[in-house]
Structure formats: structure tokens, C-alpha cells
Image: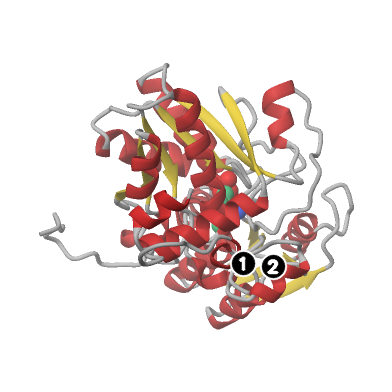
Amino acid sequence: MKNLPHQPLTSFEDAVGNTPLIRLSRLSELTGCEILGKAEFLNPGGSVKDRAALWMIREHERAGRLGPGGTVVEGTAGNTGIGIAHVCNARGYHCVIYMPDNQSPEKVQLLRTLGAEVRTVPAVPYRDEMNYQKQAGRYADSVPGAVWANQFDNTANRLAHYESTGPEIWSQTEGRVDAFVAATGTGGTLAGVSRYLKEKNRSVQIVLADPMGSALYSWVTTGSAEMSKGPSITEGIGNSRVTDNLAGTEIDDAVQVADQDMVNMVYQELLIEGWFFGSSTGINLCAAVALAKKMGPGHRIVTVLCDTGHKYQSRLFNPDYLAEKGLTPWQSQRPLKTGSRFSTKAFAASR
Ligand code: PMP
């Protein structure tokens, strides 16, 4: 029997956080390390960003900027908007989301279903004044009673992970954690968790996982934020700049992950283990395995299972889309010779 709480949760907010840690059995066996994933896909809005959404809205309320009938505006590739839309419904706010037009159609549809007003705008770099984040900020300034959540530079995002995710990981591992590895979009998760874990034990290794087409790998490894060769089909992670949330974070190392490795990982976890993860989780798991190989057997590595694959059916789980991007779904490129393709033994034998 699972250890279930005795008191019922009484609101959407109550259900945010306190997610389980999941031992990724196949990856742990493969590496001799214990690879644990924080099951953020079990948050009520379906992703790690529910925490940031809640903390940012509470901070705007506490500061007196947001009150009854108010509006929360955000520039988001999806998950933060989904979290904000839920919290806005629960607290009686309007929700307006600016989103670049290169995101999965499922996310736009879902946000509209949740009651958000979605404005898709051309995907242009951050330095462009028409960038979705800047448009969100300007719109919030122009509407009385509206606030800009500003997930990239509002450090209430990082605080969410310093006050919740970090302490949960520390307590769930009973302080036995050798490394934490995660890809970053805003940087909130990595920055908040790392601050908490480093306070508890300075020797916990903090490692940034980066997709191609992002500048953060080079920022960590060389000190200068230079974009790597892209693009990547991952969504919600990678960045061309160091946000206020990420700035000042103690990061020990970085791992860069190619899209095909991420695709293989996500399909293998689905077809062999039954987990249905999104692309950023695939990057995190590839990075966790790379880190395990570097650290050697016997270490305990924690990462984040950011969201599920449901929002990515038209892309990551669409063979035609993958083919357009020069990528191959795992089962067709590596058929297993013996036994069931669902058997871990057969998988190990095929390698
Ligand atoms: N994975 C997914 C699916 C996301 O949407 C995000 C946030 N954009 C992240 C990972 C990264 O989280 P953070 O913003 O805290 O760096």
C-alpha cells in the first residue's frame, strides 16, 4: 500500500507539489547508479510549472498588485500558462497568454479549453521588441488591474523550488543525494533546488542539462553564453540568455544532449517501462545517464520528470514530424532481435 495522506486536499493549490520520487529502474540498472525522477507530471496542472505559477501569483497578491477581478498576463511556451490558467480559475482572475507560434497546437488548444485568452505571436528572438515575453509585459502594463507573471525574471519562480521542490527532494532522499541534474527554461527549477541542496550539503553536484540550439551549456562550461548549433524539437527548455532566476546559481557542470538521444530515451521509457514522458524529461534522463557514467556506479542522481507526452503527440510522437526534422522513432531504427520488445533483458541484449 502507498503511504497516502489522511486528510483530503481541499483545493487545486493544495494539490501542487509533494510529488513522489520515482526510481527509473532500467536506467538505474544500466548505470549502477540510483536514478530518481521527481514526478512533476503528477502536479494537478500536469507539469513542474504549477509550482512557479502558484508562487508568482501569490507574490503579486502579497505585494498588493493583484486583487479580485484582476488579470494575470504571461509570455509562455505552454506549461507555465497552463499552471497560471488553473490558478486563475481557482482564484477568480482573467488569464492572458502570449505564446510563440512555433509551439505544439495541443498546448494552444488546452490553454483555450482552460479558459485562457491565447495570443500567438511570431517566434522572434528575445532581443526583438515583438518577442512574446516583451509583448506580454507591455500588455500587462497597459491594462488596469493586470500583472505580468514574468516567469523568466521574477524570482518568485526560483523561490517556489527553493521552498518546495528542494526540501521535498532532501527529505525524500533522507539527505542522501549525490547530484541533481535538470534542463532549464527559466532556470527556476535548477536555481531553486540547487540553492536548497547546496545549503544542506555543499558537495551535492548540480548539473545543467541542455538541448542543442541553447546558450546555457557554453555559459556553464566557458562562462560565455554562446548559442550551440540547433535547432531542437524540445519545448520549454534551453535559452539564449541567463535569466534573473538562473543568475548567481552555483552549477558544477553541464551536459549537452542531442535530439535523437532524447527521442530514443523517451520511446524506450514508453515502450519498455510504460512511462509517457515529454521531451524535456527525455533530455533530463539522457543527462542523468551521462552523469552516472561520469560519476561511476553507486551514486544517487535526482532529476525531474517535467511533464507527460500528451501535449506532444503531434510532434515528438508523430513519425512524420520526426522525419521532417531528420529524427527517427526508436523502435523502427533499433528492432530487437529476441524475445518481446518490451523486455528489459531483450533490450540489454540488443545493445
Ligand atoms: N520542462 C518543461 C516541459 C517546461 O515547460 C519547462 C518550463 N518552461 C521546463 C522543463 C524548465 O523549467 P524551468 O522553467 O524551471 O527552468
Which residue position is annotated with label 2?
A: 322
Q: Nearer the viewer, residue 64 or 349?
A: 349
Q: Quadrant of the image for the N terminus?
A: bottom left
Q: Nearer the viewer, mark 2 or mark 1?
A: 2
Looking at the picture, does residue 178 appear above or below residue 45? above
* Image side of residue 63 versus residue 211, left or right: left
Q: CA separation, marks 2 and 1?
A: 7 Å
The type of colouring in the image is secondary structure
Residue 191 is situated, as x and y percent measured from the top left of the image, at 54, 34
For the point 78% across and 31% down, the residue is: 225
- Across and down, in percent, residue 203 comes to 42, 17
Disc 1 designates what residue? 316
Across and down, in percent, residue 127 comes to 87, 47
Q: Position of residue 185 (x, y in %)?
A: 63, 47
Q: Is residue 69 visible?
A: no
The residue sitting at the front extreme is: 338
Q: Are the two marked residues, 2 and 1, in contact with CB atoms closer than 8 angstroms? A: yes
Q: Residue furthest toward the top?
A: 202
Amino acid beneath label 1 = Leu
